[in-house]
Amino acid sequence: MRLAHHSYIDSVIGGSRIAITAGRKESEAAHVEDAVVRAESAPGDSIAEDSISEGSISEGSISEGSISEGSGSASSDASRSATLIYNPKAGGGGGPEPETLQEMLSEAGYEPSYRATEAPEELDAIFRESQGLIVVAGGDGTFREVVRRLYGKERPVTLLPLGTANNAARSLGIQGSLGQVVAGLQQPQKVHLDVAKARGPWGEEFVLEGAGLGMFANILSAYRPDVGKSLVRAVTAAVNTFGDNPVRCRVELDGERMDGEYLLLEVMNMRAIGPRLQLAPDADPTDGLLDVVLVKYENRDAWLAYFRGLMTSGLSDLPSVEVKRGRKLKVNWRASAFHVDGQTLCEDARESETKTFSALIEVIPGALEVWLPSSTEGQ
C-alpha cells in the first residue's frame, strides 16, 4: 500500500527553511487554483446491508486517552514568552523578512530572538526547549505540522496566515492585514481547537482540516502531489477522475446509518480544504463536532453546480448535498481512495470494485488552546 504525501498549501516544510524565534519576555496573499471537473460513470453494486459491524473497527480504537499528556505548561496573561515558527516559502514566498516579524511581535509586547531549522522533525526539540506561546507564521501545511505535535499539550498556539488558501485561519475567523493580526495579539481571544483522528487500513492519522473519499480523494490520488505541483497535471487528474464509478458506501454517524452512491463524502473540521474548497461553510473547528458532507451521485447534471459551489459558500444549498454533524463516523466503502488533509491513503481501494474498506473518524474536542487576535470576529 502506498502512502503519498501532499502539501497543496505550503511546499511541505521539509526542504524549506522555517525560522524559529524564541523569546522570554511575556507574549494574505491568497489565491485559488482552478480545475475543470467533468465526469460520467455508471452506478455499481451496493454494499451489503450488514457491511458495517461493531467488529470492523474496535469501539475504543480512538479515545481521549490517545492524547499524550505532553510536557510544558499553559501560558498565563503574566507571561509573554513566545516561539515563532516561520515558513518564508508559504504562499509561494515573498513574505516578510524574519526581522520584520520580530519587530511586529516586539510592538505587540513580545521580545523575540531568531534562529532557523531545516525540517519539521526539528520542531520537537524546539518545543521541548522553549516555553510560552507558539506563533505560527505560514500556511496550512506549517500550521498542521505544529498542531499535530502540540495537540493535547498545555501549550497555546496562534496563527499568522501567510499561505495560499489559509483554510485554518479563515475557519477560525482570523482576518485583516498581518500587522492588524499581530497587533490584535496584545489582548488575545482564547479558544480551544478541535482536531480528529482517522483510523483505517493505514493505521491512525491526525486530521486537522478534513478527511474523506470520493471525488477529492481520487483527484489527489491521480494527481500524485508527491512529485510536485502542476496545473496541467491537476486539470488532467480532475478530468480523468470523473470517469470513475460512484463511491458505494455505508455510513454510521453517532449511531445513525446512511447508505448510497456518492460523488464524495467529506468529514470536515475546518470550513474548507485543499485550494480553498468550501465543502462545509458553516463548520466551526471549536464546537466539538465534525461536519459530514455527502454529495449524492445521482444528479449528474449538477456536477458543474457542485464545482461552482466548492469555490463559494453555496454547496450545502444544492439539492443532492446532505450536511450532518456528529462526533464519531464509521464508514465502509468501495472504489475510492481515502484522504486525510492533503495526504492520499488507501490508494489501492480506488481500483477495487469488490473489496470493502473501513475507517473510523472521531473528533477530539478542545485539543489545543489557540489565541486569536482581539479584532477577530466570531465564526
Image (cartoon, grey):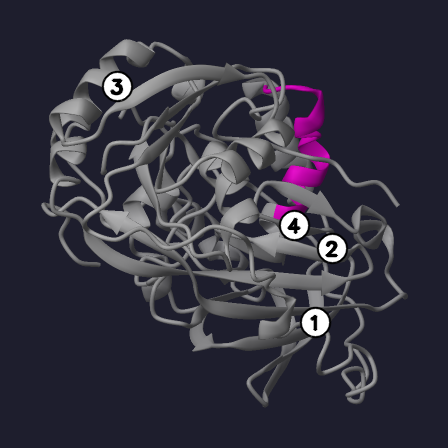
Q: Quadrant of residue 82?
A: top left
Q: Nearer the viewer, residue 256 or 298?
A: 256
What residue sits right under mark 4 in the picture? 339
Residue type at the position of mark 3: Leu
Residue 158: x %, y % from top left: 32, 42
What residue sits right under mark 3 in the picture? 101
What residue sits right under mark 1 in the picture? 249
What residue sits right under mark 2 in the picture? 336
Q: Quadrant of residue 234?
A: top right
Q: Secondary structure at mark 2?
A: loop
Q: Are marks 3 and 4 in contact (CB under 8 Å)?
A: no
Q: Nearer the viewer, residue 26 or 34?
A: 26
Residue 45: x %, y % from top left: 80, 72
Residue type at the position of mark 2: Ser
Q: Does residue 32 appear in this view?
A: yes
Q: Nearer the viewer, residue 23 or 330?
A: 23
Residue type at the position of mark 1: Cys
Q: Secondary structure at mark 4?
A: strand
Q: Are marks 1 and 3 in contact (CB under 8 Å)?
A: no
Magenta-highlighted residues = 217-229
Real-space Cα separation, disc 1 to disc 3, in angstroms: 48 Å
Task: Indicate which label's residue lies in the foreground, 1 or 3.
Answer: 3
Q: Are marks 1 and 2 in contact (CB under 8 Å)?
A: yes
Residue 99: x %, y % from top left: 28, 10
